Amino acid sequence: LSIAFINGEFVDVNQRVLPIDERGHQFGDGVYEVVKVYHSTPFLLNEHLQRLQNSAENIQIKLPYSLQEIEAIILQGIEKSGLADAEVYFQITRGIAPRNHLFPDVPPSFTMTIKPSRVVPQKSYEEGVSTILVEDDRWAKCYIKSLNLLPNILAKQLAASNGHFEAIMVKDGYVTEGTSSNVFAVKAGCLYTTPLTSNILPGITRAAILKLAEKKGIPFVEENFTSTFLLEADEVFMTSTSVEVLPVRLVDGNLIGTGNPGEVTKTIHEALKELYRVKV
Amino acid sequence: LSIAFINGEFVDVNQRVLPIDERGHQFGDGVYEVVKVYHSTPFLLNEHLQRLQNSAENIQIKLPYSLQEIEAIILQGIEKSGLADAEVYFQITRGIAPRNHLFPDVPPSFTMTIKPSRVVPQKSYEEGVSTILVEDDRWAKCYIKSLNLLPNILAKQLAASNGHFEAIMVKDGYVTEGTSSNVFAVKAGCLYTTPLTSNILPGITRAAILKLAEKKGIPFVEENFTSTFLLEADEVFMTSTSVEVLPVRLVDGNLIGTGNPGEVTKTIHEALKELYRVKV
Protein backbone atom coordinates (compact mmCIF):
# COMPACT_ATOMS: atom_id res chain seq x y z
CA LEU A 1 0.00 0.00 0.00
CA SER A 2 1.40 3.41 -0.96
CA ILE A 3 1.35 5.86 1.88
CA ALA A 4 2.16 9.52 2.50
CA PHE A 5 3.09 11.71 5.44
CA ILE A 6 3.01 15.42 6.09
CA ASN A 7 4.10 17.29 9.21
CA GLY A 8 3.20 14.66 11.79
CA GLU A 9 0.35 12.91 10.03
CA PHE A 10 0.06 9.87 7.79
CA VAL A 11 -2.28 10.55 4.88
CA ASP A 12 -3.40 9.03 1.62
CA VAL A 13 -0.91 9.64 -1.21
CA ASN A 14 -3.58 11.43 -3.23
CA GLN A 15 -4.84 13.60 -0.41
CA ARG A 16 -4.72 17.33 -1.06
CA VAL A 17 -2.48 18.54 1.73
CA LEU A 18 -0.76 21.64 0.33
CA PRO A 19 -2.05 25.12 -0.43
CA ILE A 20 -0.95 27.06 -3.52
CA ASP A 21 1.28 29.32 -1.41
CA GLU A 22 3.85 26.67 -0.57
CA ARG A 23 7.60 27.18 -1.03
CA GLY A 24 8.13 23.94 -2.90
CA HIS A 25 5.23 24.57 -5.24
CA GLN A 26 6.18 28.16 -6.06
CA PHE A 27 9.98 28.25 -5.84
CA GLY A 28 11.26 24.67 -5.69
CA ASP A 29 12.55 25.92 -2.35
CA GLY A 30 13.51 22.69 -0.66
CA VAL A 31 15.65 19.56 -0.62
CA TYR A 32 14.88 15.87 -0.86
CA GLU A 33 16.09 12.28 -0.67
CA VAL A 34 15.06 8.95 -2.14
CA VAL A 35 15.80 5.82 -0.12
CA LYS A 36 15.33 2.28 -1.34
CA VAL A 37 13.84 -0.33 0.96
CA TYR A 38 14.91 -3.96 0.55
CA HIS A 39 13.31 -6.64 2.68
CA SER A 40 11.59 -3.96 4.77
CA THR A 41 14.93 -2.30 5.59
CA PRO A 42 15.91 1.14 4.28
CA PHE A 43 19.29 0.86 2.56
CA LEU A 44 22.09 3.25 3.53
CA LEU A 45 19.59 5.36 5.46
CA ASN A 46 22.14 7.15 7.64
CA GLU A 47 24.03 8.32 4.58
CA HIS A 48 20.82 9.69 3.04
CA LEU A 49 19.83 11.42 6.27
CA GLN A 50 23.25 13.00 6.59
CA ARG A 51 23.06 14.29 3.03
CA LEU A 52 19.57 15.67 3.65
CA GLN A 53 20.96 17.60 6.59
CA ASN A 54 23.84 18.92 4.47
CA SER A 55 21.49 19.96 1.65
CA ALA A 56 19.15 21.71 4.09
CA GLU A 57 22.05 23.56 5.74
CA ASN A 58 23.35 24.66 2.36
CA ILE A 59 20.09 26.45 1.61
CA GLN A 60 19.59 27.51 5.23
CA ILE A 61 16.57 25.41 6.07
CA LYS A 62 16.47 24.15 9.63
CA LEU A 63 15.21 20.56 9.70
CA PRO A 64 11.84 20.38 11.44
CA TYR A 65 12.86 17.04 12.99
CA SER A 66 16.09 15.52 14.20
CA LEU A 67 17.60 12.85 11.95
CA GLN A 68 16.59 10.29 14.58
CA GLU A 69 12.99 11.49 14.38
CA ILE A 70 13.03 11.33 10.59
CA GLU A 71 14.40 7.80 10.79
CA ALA A 72 11.58 6.85 13.16
CA ILE A 73 8.98 8.36 10.80
CA ILE A 74 10.44 6.43 7.87
CA LEU A 75 10.50 3.14 9.77
CA GLN A 76 6.94 3.69 10.97
CA GLY A 77 5.88 4.50 7.40
CA ILE A 78 7.49 1.38 5.99
CA GLU A 79 5.69 -0.71 8.57
CA LYS A 80 2.37 0.99 7.87
CA SER A 81 2.81 0.52 4.13
CA GLY A 82 3.39 -3.19 4.55
CA LEU A 83 5.82 -2.97 1.63
CA ALA A 84 8.95 -5.12 1.74
CA ASP A 85 10.52 -3.49 -1.32
CA ALA A 86 9.78 0.18 -1.59
CA GLU A 87 11.00 3.64 -2.45
CA VAL A 88 10.82 6.24 0.29
CA TYR A 89 10.72 9.78 -1.06
CA PHE A 90 10.96 12.63 1.41
CA GLN A 91 11.42 16.34 1.03
CA ILE A 92 11.72 19.40 3.21
CA THR A 93 10.53 22.76 1.95
CA ARG A 94 10.77 26.16 3.58
CA GLY A 95 7.11 25.81 4.41
CA ILE A 96 3.72 27.33 3.80
CA ALA A 97 3.70 31.12 3.55
CA PRO A 98 2.35 33.93 1.37
CA ARG A 99 4.52 34.12 -1.75
CA ASN A 100 7.62 36.27 -1.26
CA HIS A 101 11.23 35.55 -2.21
CA LEU A 102 12.45 36.26 1.32
CA PHE A 103 12.58 33.45 3.88
CA PRO A 104 9.27 33.32 5.75
CA ASP A 105 9.07 32.96 9.52
CA VAL A 106 7.16 29.66 9.39
CA PRO A 107 8.13 26.07 10.16
CA PRO A 108 9.57 24.06 7.25
CA SER A 109 7.38 21.27 5.86
CA PHE A 110 8.33 17.61 5.85
CA THR A 111 6.51 15.43 3.34
CA MET A 112 7.09 11.79 2.46
CA THR A 113 5.69 9.11 0.19
CA ILE A 114 6.38 5.39 0.36
CA LYS A 115 5.55 3.37 -2.75
CA PRO A 116 6.46 0.07 -4.35
CA SER A 117 9.90 0.30 -5.96
CA ARG A 118 9.93 1.17 -9.62
CA VAL A 119 11.53 -1.73 -11.41
CA VAL A 120 14.22 -1.40 -14.07
CA PRO A 121 13.68 -4.26 -16.55
CA GLN A 122 16.11 -7.17 -16.06
CA LYS A 123 16.93 -6.84 -19.75
CA SER A 124 18.49 -3.42 -19.11
CA TYR A 125 20.96 -5.00 -16.67
CA GLU A 126 21.73 -7.83 -19.06
CA GLU A 127 22.18 -5.74 -22.18
CA GLY A 128 23.00 -2.28 -20.92
CA VAL A 129 21.08 0.89 -21.73
CA SER A 130 21.39 3.61 -24.32
CA THR A 131 22.36 7.15 -23.29
CA ILE A 132 22.96 10.51 -24.89
CA LEU A 133 25.35 13.34 -24.09
CA VAL A 134 23.82 16.74 -23.35
CA GLU A 135 25.24 20.09 -22.34
CA ASP A 136 25.10 20.54 -18.56
CA ASP A 137 23.09 23.76 -18.23
CA ARG A 138 22.38 23.57 -14.51
CA TRP A 139 23.22 26.09 -11.81
CA ALA A 140 26.52 26.30 -9.97
CA LYS A 141 25.51 24.35 -6.85
CA CYS A 142 24.71 20.87 -8.06
CA TYR A 143 26.08 19.37 -4.83
CA ILE A 144 22.83 20.44 -3.18
CA LYS A 145 20.03 17.91 -3.67
CA SER A 146 17.42 20.60 -4.23
CA LEU A 147 13.97 20.62 -5.77
CA ASN A 148 15.13 22.85 -8.62
CA LEU A 149 15.12 19.94 -11.05
CA LEU A 150 13.85 21.47 -14.26
CA PRO A 151 17.14 21.09 -16.20
CA ASN A 152 17.34 17.44 -15.11
CA ILE A 153 13.77 16.77 -16.18
CA LEU A 154 14.21 18.40 -19.57
CA ALA A 155 17.42 16.46 -20.30
CA LYS A 156 15.96 13.15 -19.11
CA GLN A 157 12.83 13.68 -21.21
CA LEU A 158 14.93 14.56 -24.26
CA ALA A 159 16.74 11.24 -23.83
CA ALA A 160 13.52 9.26 -23.31
CA SER A 161 11.73 10.90 -26.24
CA ASN A 162 14.52 9.61 -28.48
CA GLY A 163 14.45 6.11 -27.04
CA HIS A 164 17.32 6.45 -24.55
CA PHE A 165 17.37 5.68 -20.86
CA GLU A 166 19.43 8.56 -19.54
CA ALA A 167 21.17 11.78 -20.51
CA ILE A 168 24.79 12.20 -19.42
CA MET A 169 25.69 15.82 -18.85
CA VAL A 170 28.88 17.43 -20.10
CA LYS A 171 30.26 20.73 -18.81
CA ASP A 172 33.16 22.43 -20.60
CA GLY A 173 33.93 19.13 -22.32
CA TYR A 174 34.00 17.08 -19.11
CA VAL A 175 31.42 14.55 -17.99
CA THR A 176 29.63 15.65 -14.83
CA GLU A 177 26.83 13.16 -14.13
CA GLY A 178 23.52 11.77 -15.37
CA THR A 179 20.25 13.61 -14.78
CA SER A 180 19.50 11.29 -11.86
CA SER A 181 22.66 9.20 -11.62
CA ASN A 182 26.43 9.33 -11.28
CA VAL A 183 28.60 8.04 -14.11
CA PHE A 184 31.54 5.63 -13.98
CA ALA A 185 33.94 4.57 -16.72
CA VAL A 186 36.33 1.62 -16.70
CA LYS A 187 39.56 1.84 -18.70
CA ALA A 188 42.30 -0.81 -18.55
CA GLY A 189 40.83 -2.20 -15.33
CA CYS A 190 40.73 1.16 -13.55
CA LEU A 191 37.51 2.81 -12.41
CA TYR A 192 37.04 6.51 -13.19
CA THR A 193 34.40 8.80 -11.80
CA THR A 194 33.93 12.57 -11.62
CA PRO A 195 35.34 14.04 -8.38
CA LEU A 196 33.10 15.66 -5.80
CA THR A 197 32.94 19.36 -6.58
CA SER A 198 30.01 21.75 -6.75
CA ASN A 199 29.37 20.30 -10.24
CA ILE A 200 27.86 17.01 -9.11
CA LEU A 201 25.71 15.48 -6.43
CA PRO A 202 27.62 13.34 -3.94
CA GLY A 203 25.77 10.14 -4.77
CA ILE A 204 25.18 7.71 -1.92
CA THR A 205 25.51 4.74 -4.29
CA ARG A 206 28.60 6.39 -5.82
CA ALA A 207 30.26 6.54 -2.40
CA ALA A 208 29.26 2.96 -1.56
CA ILE A 209 30.80 1.77 -4.82
CA LEU A 210 34.10 3.51 -4.23
CA LYS A 211 34.28 1.77 -0.85
CA LEU A 212 33.48 -1.55 -2.50
CA ALA A 213 36.10 -0.98 -5.19
CA GLU A 214 38.67 -0.39 -2.48
CA LYS A 215 37.58 -3.54 -0.67
CA LYS A 216 37.67 -5.60 -3.86
CA GLY A 217 41.06 -4.25 -4.90
CA ILE A 218 39.70 -2.53 -8.01
CA PRO A 219 41.85 0.56 -8.65
CA PHE A 220 39.89 3.80 -8.96
CA VAL A 221 40.44 7.50 -9.45
CA GLU A 222 38.11 10.44 -8.88
CA GLU A 223 39.13 12.60 -11.78
CA ASN A 224 37.43 14.67 -14.44
CA PHE A 225 37.27 12.95 -17.81
CA THR A 226 36.10 14.11 -21.22
CA SER A 227 33.18 12.79 -23.23
CA THR A 228 35.77 11.35 -25.67
CA PHE A 229 37.33 9.38 -22.82
CA LEU A 230 33.86 8.09 -21.96
CA LEU A 231 33.21 6.96 -25.54
CA GLU A 232 36.53 5.12 -25.60
CA ALA A 233 36.08 3.42 -22.22
CA ASP A 234 35.99 -0.37 -21.90
CA GLU A 235 32.92 -0.19 -19.68
CA VAL A 236 30.53 2.55 -18.60
CA PHE A 237 27.88 2.32 -15.94
CA MET A 238 25.62 4.67 -14.05
CA THR A 239 24.72 4.47 -10.39
CA SER A 240 21.81 5.72 -8.30
CA THR A 241 19.60 4.63 -5.46
CA SER A 242 16.93 3.59 -7.94
CA VAL A 243 18.98 1.82 -10.62
CA GLU A 244 21.83 0.64 -8.35
CA VAL A 245 24.51 -0.18 -10.97
CA LEU A 246 23.25 -0.04 -14.53
CA PRO A 247 25.51 -0.90 -17.49
CA VAL A 248 25.63 1.57 -20.38
CA ARG A 249 25.70 -0.03 -23.81
CA LEU A 250 25.54 3.08 -25.97
CA VAL A 251 26.59 6.69 -25.61
CA ASP A 252 25.34 8.88 -28.43
CA GLY A 253 25.02 5.75 -30.54
CA ASN A 254 28.61 4.62 -29.90
CA LEU A 255 29.00 1.10 -28.58
CA ILE A 256 30.95 1.01 -25.30
CA GLY A 257 33.56 -1.78 -25.26
CA THR A 258 32.01 -4.97 -26.60
CA GLY A 259 28.57 -3.54 -25.94
CA ASN A 260 27.90 -6.13 -23.26
CA PRO A 261 28.09 -5.35 -19.55
CA GLY A 262 31.73 -5.63 -18.47
CA GLU A 263 33.30 -7.64 -15.68
CA VAL A 264 34.02 -4.68 -13.43
CA THR A 265 30.43 -3.46 -13.78
CA LYS A 266 29.07 -6.90 -12.88
CA THR A 267 31.48 -7.36 -9.97
CA ILE A 268 30.59 -3.96 -8.54
CA HIS A 269 26.86 -4.55 -8.87
CA GLU A 270 27.10 -7.95 -7.19
CA ALA A 271 29.12 -6.44 -4.36
CA LEU A 272 26.47 -3.73 -3.87
CA LYS A 273 23.71 -6.32 -3.79
CA GLU A 274 25.63 -8.18 -1.09
CA LEU A 275 25.37 -5.10 1.10
CA TYR A 276 21.62 -5.19 1.29
CA ARG A 277 21.37 -8.95 1.12
CA VAL A 278 23.45 -9.42 4.26
CA LYS A 279 21.31 -6.88 6.06
CA VAL A 280 18.34 -9.25 6.18
CA LEU B 1 -10.29 39.85 -0.12
CA SER B 2 -7.50 37.55 -1.24
CA ILE B 3 -8.69 34.78 -3.50
CA ALA B 4 -7.27 31.68 -5.18
CA PHE B 5 -8.09 29.52 -8.17
CA ILE B 6 -7.15 26.04 -9.23
CA ASN B 7 -8.16 24.20 -12.39
CA GLY B 8 -11.60 25.70 -12.85
CA GLU B 9 -12.55 26.49 -9.30
CA PHE B 10 -12.22 29.54 -7.05
CA VAL B 11 -11.02 28.55 -3.58
CA ASP B 12 -9.79 30.10 -0.37
CA VAL B 13 -6.09 31.09 -0.55
CA ASN B 14 -5.31 28.81 2.38
CA GLN B 15 -7.24 25.82 1.11
CA ARG B 16 -5.23 22.63 0.71
CA VAL B 17 -5.63 21.91 -2.97
CA LEU B 18 -2.43 20.06 -3.95
CA PRO B 19 -1.19 16.56 -3.17
CA ILE B 20 2.49 15.85 -2.38
CA ASP B 21 2.99 14.30 -5.83
CA GLU B 22 2.70 17.52 -7.77
CA ARG B 23 5.26 18.62 -10.36
CA GLY B 24 5.65 22.12 -8.96
CA HIS B 25 6.10 20.86 -5.42
CA GLN B 26 8.63 18.17 -6.29
CA PHE B 27 10.54 19.54 -9.30
CA GLY B 28 9.71 23.22 -9.66
CA ASP B 29 8.39 21.97 -13.00
CA GLY B 30 6.38 24.95 -14.15
CA VAL B 31 6.25 28.58 -15.17
CA TYR B 32 4.58 31.65 -13.73
CA GLU B 33 3.66 35.30 -14.07
CA VAL B 34 2.89 38.18 -11.73
CA VAL B 35 0.55 40.89 -12.96
CA LYS B 36 -0.19 44.13 -11.16
CA VAL B 37 -3.73 45.44 -11.02
CA TYR B 38 -4.28 49.20 -10.85
CA HIS B 39 -7.79 50.58 -10.50
CA SER B 40 -9.23 47.09 -11.07
CA THR B 41 -7.39 46.77 -14.40
CA PRO B 42 -4.53 44.30 -14.93
CA PHE B 43 -1.53 46.23 -16.31
CA LEU B 44 0.18 45.01 -19.49
CA LEU B 45 -1.77 41.76 -19.27
CA ASN B 46 -1.33 40.75 -22.90
CA GLU B 47 2.44 41.02 -22.57
CA HIS B 48 2.40 38.81 -19.48
CA LEU B 49 0.15 36.24 -21.12
CA GLN B 50 2.37 36.12 -24.19
CA ARG B 51 5.44 35.57 -22.01
CA LEU B 52 3.63 32.82 -20.08
CA GLN B 53 2.96 31.08 -23.36
CA ASN B 54 6.61 31.42 -24.41
CA SER B 55 7.86 30.09 -21.06
CA ALA B 56 5.48 27.14 -21.20
CA GLU B 57 6.52 26.32 -24.77
CA ASN B 58 10.17 26.47 -23.79
CA ILE B 59 9.69 23.71 -21.23
CA GLN B 60 7.14 21.87 -23.38
CA ILE B 61 4.06 22.42 -21.25
CA LYS B 62 0.86 22.83 -23.20
CA LEU B 63 -1.28 25.54 -21.63
CA PRO B 64 -4.48 24.05 -20.20
CA TYR B 65 -6.39 27.16 -21.28
CA SER B 66 -6.16 29.56 -24.18
CA LEU B 67 -4.73 32.99 -23.37
CA GLN B 68 -8.23 34.38 -23.80
CA GLU B 69 -9.55 31.93 -21.22
CA ILE B 70 -6.76 32.82 -18.79
CA GLU B 71 -7.56 36.48 -19.28
CA ALA B 72 -11.21 35.77 -18.49
CA ILE B 73 -10.26 33.84 -15.33
CA ILE B 74 -8.05 36.71 -14.19
CA LEU B 75 -10.73 39.32 -14.81
CA GLN B 76 -13.31 37.19 -13.04
CA GLY B 77 -10.90 36.73 -10.12
CA ILE B 78 -10.22 40.44 -9.82
CA GLU B 79 -13.93 41.12 -9.73
CA LYS B 80 -14.53 38.40 -7.13
CA SER B 81 -11.69 39.72 -4.98
CA GLY B 82 -13.16 43.20 -4.97
CA LEU B 83 -9.58 44.52 -4.96
CA ALA B 84 -8.83 47.66 -6.94
CA ASP B 85 -5.06 47.41 -6.47
CA ALA B 86 -3.82 43.87 -6.47
CA GLU B 87 -1.16 41.40 -7.49
CA VAL B 88 -2.27 38.48 -9.60
CA TYR B 89 0.08 35.51 -9.34
CA PHE B 90 -0.51 32.57 -11.65
CA GLN B 91 1.49 29.50 -12.46
CA ILE B 92 1.23 26.45 -14.67
CA THR B 93 2.86 23.20 -13.62
CA ARG B 94 3.12 19.94 -15.49
CA GLY B 95 0.40 18.63 -13.21
CA ILE B 96 -0.37 16.04 -10.59
CA ALA B 97 1.30 12.67 -11.15
CA PRO B 98 3.32 10.03 -9.28
CA ARG B 99 6.89 11.33 -8.95
CA ASN B 100 9.03 10.54 -11.99
CA HIS B 101 11.39 12.78 -13.94
CA LEU B 102 9.69 11.94 -17.23
CA PHE B 103 6.74 14.02 -18.42
CA PRO B 104 3.51 12.47 -17.13
CA ASP B 105 0.45 12.00 -19.30
CA VAL B 106 -1.78 14.24 -17.19
CA PRO B 107 -3.26 17.70 -17.69
CA PRO B 108 -1.10 20.64 -16.54
CA SER B 109 -2.35 22.54 -13.48
CA PHE B 110 -3.26 26.21 -13.47
CA THR B 111 -3.23 27.94 -10.09
CA MET B 112 -3.69 31.60 -9.26
CA THR B 113 -3.81 33.89 -6.26
CA ILE B 114 -5.04 37.47 -6.18
CA LYS B 115 -3.96 39.56 -3.20
CA PRO B 116 -3.59 43.20 -2.21
CA SER B 117 -0.44 44.65 -3.79
CA ARG B 118 2.65 44.57 -1.64
CA VAL B 119 3.70 48.15 -1.13
CA VAL B 120 7.26 49.42 -1.51
CA PRO B 121 7.67 52.26 1.02
CA GLN B 122 7.49 55.72 -0.53
CA LYS B 123 10.81 56.45 1.15
CA SER B 124 12.51 53.88 -1.09
CA TYR B 125 11.40 55.82 -4.16
CA GLU B 126 12.47 59.12 -2.68
CA GLU B 127 15.87 58.03 -1.43
CA GLY B 128 16.73 54.98 -3.52
CA VAL B 129 17.56 51.55 -2.16
CA SER B 130 20.72 49.70 -1.28
CA THR B 131 21.87 46.71 -3.34
CA ILE B 132 24.74 44.24 -3.41
CA LEU B 133 26.51 42.49 -6.26
CA VAL B 134 26.49 38.69 -6.24
CA GLU B 135 27.82 36.06 -8.58
CA ASP B 136 25.10 34.88 -10.97
CA ASP B 137 25.05 31.13 -10.31
CA ARG B 138 21.81 30.30 -12.11
CA TRP B 139 21.24 27.85 -14.94
CA ALA B 140 21.72 28.62 -18.61
CA LYS B 141 18.09 29.36 -19.49
CA CYS B 142 17.18 32.41 -17.44
CA TYR B 143 14.93 33.67 -20.24
CA ILE B 144 12.37 31.12 -19.08
CA LYS B 145 10.23 32.38 -16.19
CA SER B 146 10.31 29.04 -14.40
CA LEU B 147 9.60 27.96 -10.84
CA ASN B 148 13.26 26.96 -10.32
CA LEU B 149 13.90 30.04 -8.21
CA LEU B 150 16.23 28.78 -5.50
CA PRO B 151 19.28 30.78 -6.65
CA ASN B 152 17.15 33.93 -6.80
CA ILE B 153 15.76 33.33 -3.32
CA LEU B 154 19.17 32.70 -1.79
CA ALA B 155 20.67 35.83 -3.35
CA LYS B 156 17.69 38.00 -2.38
CA GLN B 157 17.79 36.69 1.18
CA LEU B 158 21.53 37.32 1.39
CA ALA B 159 20.87 40.93 0.41
CA ALA B 160 17.99 41.34 2.85
CA SER B 161 19.85 39.71 5.74
CA ASN B 162 22.50 42.40 5.34
CA GLY B 163 20.02 45.23 5.14
CA HIS B 164 19.83 45.60 1.37
CA PHE B 165 16.79 45.61 -0.89
CA GLU B 166 18.05 43.58 -3.83
CA ALA B 167 20.99 41.55 -5.12
CA ILE B 168 22.27 42.41 -8.60
CA MET B 169 23.76 39.40 -10.32
CA VAL B 170 27.04 39.45 -12.21
CA LYS B 171 28.11 36.78 -14.69
CA ASP B 172 31.68 36.75 -16.03
CA GLY B 173 32.07 40.34 -14.89
CA TYR B 174 28.91 41.59 -16.58
CA VAL B 175 25.68 42.64 -14.90
CA THR B 176 22.80 40.36 -15.80
CA GLU B 177 19.79 41.35 -13.68
CA GLY B 178 18.41 41.50 -10.15
CA THR B 179 16.93 38.44 -8.44
CA SER B 180 13.45 39.68 -9.30
CA SER B 181 14.13 42.77 -11.39
CA ASN B 182 15.94 44.08 -14.44
CA VAL B 183 18.72 46.63 -14.01
CA PHE B 184 19.25 49.94 -15.83
CA ALA B 185 22.16 52.36 -15.66
CA VAL B 186 22.26 55.96 -16.88
CA LYS B 187 25.58 57.42 -18.06
CA ALA B 188 25.88 60.85 -19.67
CA GLY B 189 22.15 60.91 -20.36
CA CYS B 190 22.09 57.51 -22.09
CA LEU B 191 20.17 54.54 -20.73
CA TYR B 192 21.97 51.17 -20.60
CA THR B 193 20.40 47.81 -19.96
CA THR B 194 21.50 44.21 -20.46
CA PRO B 195 20.42 42.82 -23.85
CA LEU B 196 17.93 39.98 -24.14
CA THR B 197 19.90 36.75 -24.23
CA SER B 198 19.39 33.47 -22.39
CA ASN B 199 21.07 35.18 -19.40
CA ILE B 200 18.11 37.32 -18.38
CA LEU B 201 14.37 37.33 -18.20
CA PRO B 202 12.68 39.54 -20.79
CA GLY B 203 11.04 41.84 -18.26
CA ILE B 204 7.66 43.27 -19.17
CA THR B 205 8.43 46.49 -17.33
CA ARG B 206 11.88 46.53 -18.97
CA ALA B 207 10.27 46.41 -22.42
CA ALA B 208 7.70 49.06 -21.51
CA ILE B 209 10.49 51.36 -20.35
CA LEU B 210 12.50 51.01 -23.53
CA LYS B 211 9.40 52.00 -25.48
CA LEU B 212 8.88 54.98 -23.19
CA ALA B 213 12.54 56.01 -23.55
CA GLU B 214 12.12 55.99 -27.30
CA LYS B 215 8.95 58.05 -27.04
CA LYS B 216 10.55 60.53 -24.67
CA GLY B 217 13.67 60.85 -26.81
CA ILE B 218 15.96 59.38 -24.14
CA PRO B 219 18.80 57.57 -25.92
CA PHE B 220 19.25 53.94 -24.88
CA VAL B 221 21.39 50.92 -25.70
CA GLU B 222 20.86 47.26 -24.91
CA GLU B 223 24.42 46.27 -24.23
CA ASN B 224 26.33 44.24 -21.66
CA PHE B 225 28.07 46.38 -19.06
CA THR B 226 30.45 45.51 -16.25
CA SER B 227 29.86 45.92 -12.54
CA THR B 228 32.49 48.70 -12.63
CA PHE B 229 30.42 50.55 -15.22
CA LEU B 230 27.42 50.17 -12.94
CA LEU B 231 29.28 51.62 -9.95
CA GLU B 232 30.41 54.60 -12.03
CA ALA B 233 26.97 55.29 -13.53
CA ASP B 234 25.19 58.60 -12.93
CA GLU B 235 21.95 56.80 -12.10
CA VAL B 236 20.94 53.20 -11.53
CA PHE B 237 17.45 51.85 -11.22
CA MET B 238 15.75 48.48 -11.19
CA THR B 239 12.46 47.59 -12.80
CA SER B 240 9.83 44.94 -12.22
CA THR B 241 6.09 44.49 -12.16
CA SER B 242 6.11 44.84 -8.38
CA VAL B 243 8.51 47.75 -7.87
CA GLU B 244 7.88 49.53 -11.21
CA VAL B 245 10.96 51.81 -11.39
CA LEU B 246 12.97 51.86 -8.19
CA PRO B 247 16.06 54.09 -7.84
CA VAL B 248 19.25 52.47 -6.55
CA ARG B 249 21.22 54.60 -4.12
CA LEU B 250 23.97 52.14 -3.20
CA VAL B 251 25.69 49.24 -4.93
CA ASP B 252 28.00 47.32 -2.61
CA GLY B 253 28.18 50.42 -0.42
CA ASN B 254 29.16 52.72 -3.29
CA LEU B 255 27.00 55.79 -3.75
CA ILE B 256 25.56 56.02 -7.25
CA GLY B 257 25.84 59.54 -8.70
CA THR B 258 24.74 62.06 -6.08
CA GLY B 259 22.96 59.28 -4.22
CA ASN B 260 19.59 60.84 -4.94
CA PRO B 261 17.22 59.51 -7.59
CA GLY B 262 18.26 60.97 -10.93
CA GLU B 263 16.25 62.88 -13.47
CA VAL B 264 16.11 60.07 -16.04
CA THR B 265 14.93 57.62 -13.37
CA LYS B 266 12.18 59.99 -12.27
CA THR B 267 11.13 60.81 -15.82
CA ILE B 268 10.90 57.14 -16.73
CA HIS B 269 8.91 56.25 -13.63
CA GLU B 270 6.47 59.09 -14.21
CA ALA B 271 6.03 57.97 -17.82
CA LEU B 272 5.31 54.42 -16.68
CA LYS B 273 2.74 55.62 -14.18
CA GLU B 274 1.04 57.56 -16.97
CA LEU B 275 0.47 54.26 -18.76
CA TYR B 276 -1.74 52.83 -16.08
CA ARG B 277 -3.20 56.16 -15.06
CA VAL B 278 -4.61 56.82 -18.49
CA LYS B 279 -6.18 53.37 -18.53
CA VAL B 280 -8.72 54.37 -15.87
Image (cartoon, coloured by chain):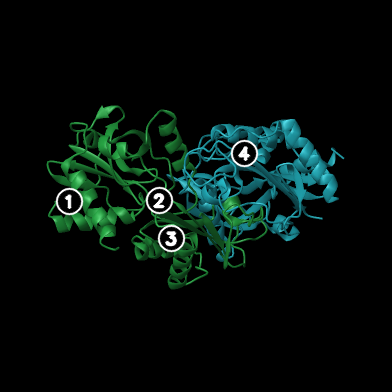
Chain colours: A cyan, B green
Circle 4 or circle 1, nearest the eye? 4
Residues beneath discs 3 and 2 located on the same chain: yes
* Amino acid at the residue labelled 1: Phe
Q: Position of residue B220 (x, y in %)?
A: 17, 51
Q: Secondary structure at mark 2?
A: loop
Identity, as a three-letter code, of the amino acid under mark 4: Pro
Within 10 Å of disc 4 (Cα), the crowding (few <14, some 14-19, many 20+) is many
Q: Chain of mark 3?
A: B
Query: Upstream in the sequence, badge 2 or badge 1?
Result: 2
Do marks 2 and 1 share a subunit? yes
Indicate the chain on which mark 2 is placed: B
Name the disc covering residue B142, or none: 2
Query: Which residue is drawn at the image coordinates 74% and 57% (left, top)?
Result: A119
Circles 4 and 3, Cβ within 8 Å, touching? The answer is no
- The residue to which callout 4 is attached is A108
Q: In the displayed structure, does residue A205 sit left or right of residue B7?
A: right
Q: Secondary structure at mark 1?
A: strand
The nearer-to-camera label among 4 and 2 is 4
Label 4, label 1: how many angstroms apart (C-alpha)?
Answer: 45 Å
Q: Is residue B238 visible?
A: yes
Q: What subunit carries mark 1? A: B
